């Protein structure tokens, strides 16, 4: 009897230990009992590497270090790590348990991760193509599926905050984060980004768990004048409001809970210290009221990189006054010290600190962390990697762009195919960066369950038909000789060329031209006169103009993810009919990267009524194994006022022999503007599945305030009178906005 009682008591005690103290009171009552140190701790985010045994991202907890951080510094948030499901599960359970049961207030941690293309920091995670490629699908429903799978694979281990999506508009292909963007077009970035956010933050399957997305990086990060990562951007205010702000505005409408700041400087102001960008523009003008997190160690950068503050303490004051709620300090405690001192000196007010802590606690409350701080075995059991891999295959197939095809693809059966290049037999080149490791895991650490292009091609075309050349680049005469020898037995040559994965500043380059030794491989292959097919595995469009002319077919695969090889093979063999379109202009020359042929403020100039070639392949370009014909473009009206609307309709027919998916891209030109207007601006897009001979009508409801308006440099948005030209599938129609009409 006595023993039983003890057992019951022990059980109750351990259950009590493990049960979170449910938090039902409102955030303000919690705030009212917090000490200053506890508040600043909530505003501080540390890297998990500070509490692992070996200081790496591998998750072996150094319990003493962690207790120290949570009990003495009251840290409220952590980020980053890379490990298996089992390790993540154990690690986060352990840290949350200490946070919840061994601290005065029991506030759970909020844990952040960069799951930027799937659950890419979990060893068993499904790796999707990067955003640039997903954007080439022009398919919002695909983005929703990708977001959902990512959420379902991320939530079970308690990673409730995802530093995704990137909403920077990719205007500079030199920028080494180009592949993280949804491409160069504002409308496309806004649509894809908000589709991701809505889907990621609202996944019923993970209830009662909830997740937060993060709109990053506010603002102007992606157009550095000289291309390097975190180097200065200079963007006229009109352009900023028209091109760079809308994806964030749309994200706020979609309910994004958090936002990360641009590490670089914009128009001379380090954005982390800018009251103008973070308070006037973001908080007041755009009305964002969620949590603003800094990027990693960026208060230090205000001093060391931007030289816009003499000391880190001054920089801390700048960042706090600008409006940073949480500092991604990673491994330093100076933020805690300086905020404390600044408050003591009366330079910061308690009201400022309270406002930030309130937002952070509210976020934790909204995510249900007080009730459910621990990872969930139940959700973990429900992760279905087999089904998720199918979504990865679909995503890759819908993202790979067929750029050129001189009657060479699909590849016929029983042809002898030589496969060569740095991507021919590599998993790393498929998954790309931010895959198990910031720079992409080493070849040996890539998933065992995944196949390389060589392997999928053998499966599809027969082992005896596919040969792998050991020559990946031609540097020496010996390389040349051995590659030539390999080509002899081939009927055709597939070259998987491109860029080894890189992240952030590690991908800075001085020349967009693909490296000479890979181009030499292509040249030698073309000189054999055998058909050459290029598969581009790269994070940005590397210039290949001369070689593109000699190649018979070209696929842009980007970093297509864990099922990338199968998707490429399916397209090469016509198991899949390609449907993707370029979400960026493929440059013709290294010094002319975006086809501005007019003036720098007029973006989206994809077309001009002259014959000069401005790009290798324009934005929106992409081929299929069938043909589509557009006819019958009609407008419901020819003159309306700015409060009215016009419906445009067009007929699209599959005139080829195969079923296919057409991407209908609607562009509008404001013929004469009070400032120069884009010659072709994307305003709407839609995917259309059509069987051979099938035709469908497609329509687009043009609402002037939405599709025809533009901001001036003071962000005042208006619709101008005059003629507008609509352009779809090579057909044009005009209408007029006339405000006197009533
Ligand atoms: C990147 C962010 C990322 C953060 C945390 C930074 O270097 O700029 O995009 O979210 O690291 O990993």
Image (cartoon, rainbow, N blue to C red):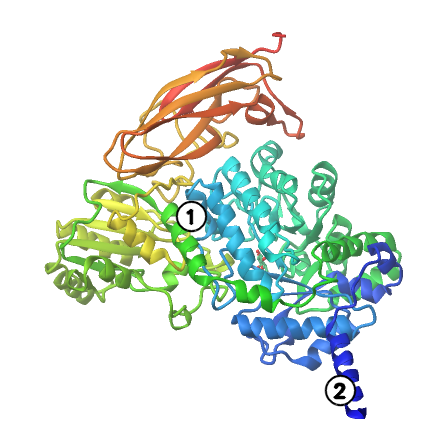
Q: Position of residue 635 (x, y in %)?
A: 46, 16
SS class, disc 1 = helix
From where the camera sits, is residue 181 visible? no
| Residue drawn at (55%, 49%) of the image | 166
Residue designated by label 2: 7
| Residue drawn at (19%, 40%) of the image | 407
Farthest residue in the front direction? Answer: 1
| Residue drawn at (53%, 51%) of the image | 147
First in sequence, mark 1 or 2: give its number.
2
* Label 1 environment density (alpha carbons within 10 Å; few <14, some 14–19, many ≥20): many
Q: Nearer the viewer, mark 1 or mark 2?
A: 2
| Residue drawn at (45%, 59%) of the image | 127
SS class, disc 2 = helix
* Label 2 environment density (alpha carbons within 10 Å; few <14, some 14–19, many ≥20): few
Residue 133 numbered tag: 1
Q: Position of residue 691 (x, y in %)?
A: 30, 35
> In the image shown, does 567 or 317 lie closer to the viewer?
567
Q: Position of residue 619 (x, y in %)?
A: 40, 36
The reply to whether the residue tagged 2 has its Cβ within 8 angstroms of ligand 1 is: no
From where the camera sits, is residue 14 visible? yes
> In the image shown, does 606 or 572 lie closer to the viewer?
572
Q: How many marks?
A: 2
């Amino acid at each position: 009897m006595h023993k039983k009682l003890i057992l019951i008591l022990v059980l109750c005690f351990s259950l009590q230990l493990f049960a979170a103290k449910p938090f039902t009171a409102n955030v303000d009552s919690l705030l009212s009992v917090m000490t200053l140190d506890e508040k600043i701790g909530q505003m501080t985010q540390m890297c998990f590497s500070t509490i692992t045994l070996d200081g790496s991202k591998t998750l072996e907890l150094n319990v003493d270090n962690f207790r120290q951080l949570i009990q003495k510094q009251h840290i409220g948030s952590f980020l980053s790590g890379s490990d298996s499901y089992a390790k993540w599960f154990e690690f986060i359970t352990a840290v949350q348990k200490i946070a919840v049961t061994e601290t005065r207030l029991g506030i759970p941690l909020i844990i952040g991760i960069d799951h930027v293309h799937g659950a890419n920091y979990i060893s068993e995670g499904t790796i999707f193509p990067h955003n640039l490629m997903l954007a080439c699908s022009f398919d919002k429903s695909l983005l929703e599926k990708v977001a959902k799978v990512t959420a379902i694979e991320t939530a079970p281990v308690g990673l409730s905050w995802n530093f995704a999506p990137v909403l920077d508009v990719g205007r500079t292909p030199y920028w080494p984060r180009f592949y993280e963007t949804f491409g160069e077009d504002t409308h496309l970035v806004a649509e894809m980004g908000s589709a991701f956010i809505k889907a990621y933050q609202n996944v019923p399957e993970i209830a009662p768990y909830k997740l937060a997305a993060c709109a990053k990086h506010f603002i102007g990060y992606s157009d550095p004048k000289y291309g390097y990562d975190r180097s200065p951007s200079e963007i006229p205010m009109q352009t900023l409001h028209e091109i760079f702000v809308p994806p964030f505005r749309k994200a706020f409408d979609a309910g994004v809970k958090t936002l990360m700041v641009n590490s670089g400087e914009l128009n001379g102001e380090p954005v982390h210290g800018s009251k103008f960008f973070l308070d006037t523009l973001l908080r007041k003008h755009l009305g964002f009221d969620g949590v603003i997190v800094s990027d990693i160690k960026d208060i230090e950068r205000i001093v060391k990189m931007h030289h816009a503050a003499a000391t880190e303490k001054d920089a801390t004051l700048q960042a706090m006054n600008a409006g940073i709620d949480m500092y991604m300090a990673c491994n330093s405690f100076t933020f805690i010290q300086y905020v404390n001192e600044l408050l003591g000196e009366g330079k910061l007010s308690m009201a400022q600190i309270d406002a930030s802590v309130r937002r952070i606690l509210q976020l934790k409350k909204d995510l249900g962390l007080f009730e459910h701080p621990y990872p969930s075995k139940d959700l973990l059991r429900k992760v279905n990697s087999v089904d998720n891999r199918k979504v990865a295959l679909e995503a890759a197939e819908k993202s790979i762009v067929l750029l050129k095809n001189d009657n060479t693809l699909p590849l016929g059966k029983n042809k002898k195919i030589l496969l060569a290049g740095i991507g021919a037999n590599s998993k790393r080149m498929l998954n790309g960066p931010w895959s198990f490791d910031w720079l992409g895991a080493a070849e040996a650490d890539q998933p065992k369950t995944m196949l390389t292009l060589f392997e999928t091609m053998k499966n599809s075309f027969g082992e005896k038909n596919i040969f792998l050349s050991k020559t990946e680049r031609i540097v020496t005469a010996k390389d040349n000789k051995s590659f030539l020898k390999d080509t002899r037995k081939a009927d055709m040559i597939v070259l998987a060329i491109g860029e080894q994965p890189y992240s952030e500043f590690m991908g800075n380059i001085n020349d967009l031209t693909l490296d000479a030794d890979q181009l030499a491989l292509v040249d030698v292959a073309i000189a054999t006169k055998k058909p050459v097919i290029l598969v581009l595995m790269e994070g940005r469009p590397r210039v290949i103009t001369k070689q593109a002319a000699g190649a018979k077919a070209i696929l842009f695969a980007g970093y297509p993810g864990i099922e990338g090889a199968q998707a490429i093979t399916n397209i090469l063999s016509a198991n899949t009919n390609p449907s993707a379109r370029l979400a960026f202009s493929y440059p013709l020359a290294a010094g002319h990267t975006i086809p501005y042929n007019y003036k720098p403020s007029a973006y989206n100039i994809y077309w001009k009524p002259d014959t000069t070639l401005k790009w290798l392949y324009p934005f929106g370009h992409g081929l299929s194994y069938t043909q589509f014909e557009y006819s019958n473009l009609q407008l419901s009206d020819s003159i309306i006022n700015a409060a009215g609307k016009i419906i445009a309709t067009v007929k699209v027919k599959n005139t080829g022999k195969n079923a296919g998916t057409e991407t209908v891209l609607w562009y509008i030109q404001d013929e004469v503007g009070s400032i120069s207007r884009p010659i072709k601006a994307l305003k709407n897009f839609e995917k259309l599945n059509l069987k051979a001979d099938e035709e469908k009508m497609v329509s687009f409801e043009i609402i002037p305030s939405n599709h025809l308006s533009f901001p001036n440099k003071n962000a005042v948005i208006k619709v101008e009178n005059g003629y507008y030209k609509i352009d779809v599938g090579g057909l044009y129609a005009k209408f007029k906005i006339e405000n006197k009409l009533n």
